[in-house]
Image (tube, rainbow, N blue to C red):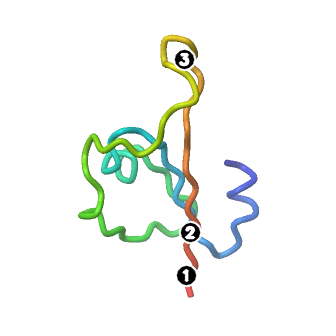
Amino acid sequence: MVWLEENRSQLSVLVHPLTEDEYLDHTSSAVWLGLPLELELSIFTKNKKRAKTHADKSECNYSFNIAITLFSQS
């Protein structure tokens, strides 16, 4: 995330996990780099499966998926 912060220029960047709860992923579990923007949260549902993990949690406790979204402030 250091590289993103140093190289994002004027972009707002939303970094969030990819779990079965899209709403939580985009709210309390998310981190903004730059100016936070208002998201249309009504499109996200709770417990909706969005992405499969690469490994079963019992096999690997340190693996997780994240998404990075760039927003232009123009």
Q: Which amino acid does label 2 sit on?
A: Ser
Binning the other alpha carbons within 10 Å of mark 3 as few (below 14), some (14 to 19) or many (20 upward) gives few
Binning the other alpha carbons within 10 Å of mark 1 as few (below 14), some (14 to 19) or many (20 upward) gives few
Residue 61's disc is: 3
Kindly indicate whether the residue at mark 3 contacts the one at mark 2 (C-beta within 8 angstroms).
Answer: no
Callout 2 secondary element = strand
**Residue for badge 1:** 73
Q: Which of marks 1 and 2 is nearer the N terminus?
A: 2
Task: Please determine whether, in this image, residue 20 is positioned above or below residue 7.
Answer: above
The residue sitting at 49% across, 51% down in the picture is 31
What x and y, as percent, mark residue 38?
36, 70
Callout 1 secondary element = loop
The residue sitting at 50% across, 19% down in the picture is 56
Kindly indicate whether the residue at mark 2 contacts the one at mark 1 (C-beta within 8 angstroms).
Answer: yes
Kindly indicate whether the residue at mark 1 contacts the one at mark 3 (C-beta within 8 angstroms).
Answer: no
Q: What residue type is labelled 3?
A: Asn
Cα distance, mark 2 to mark 3? 30 Å
Residue 12's disc is: 2
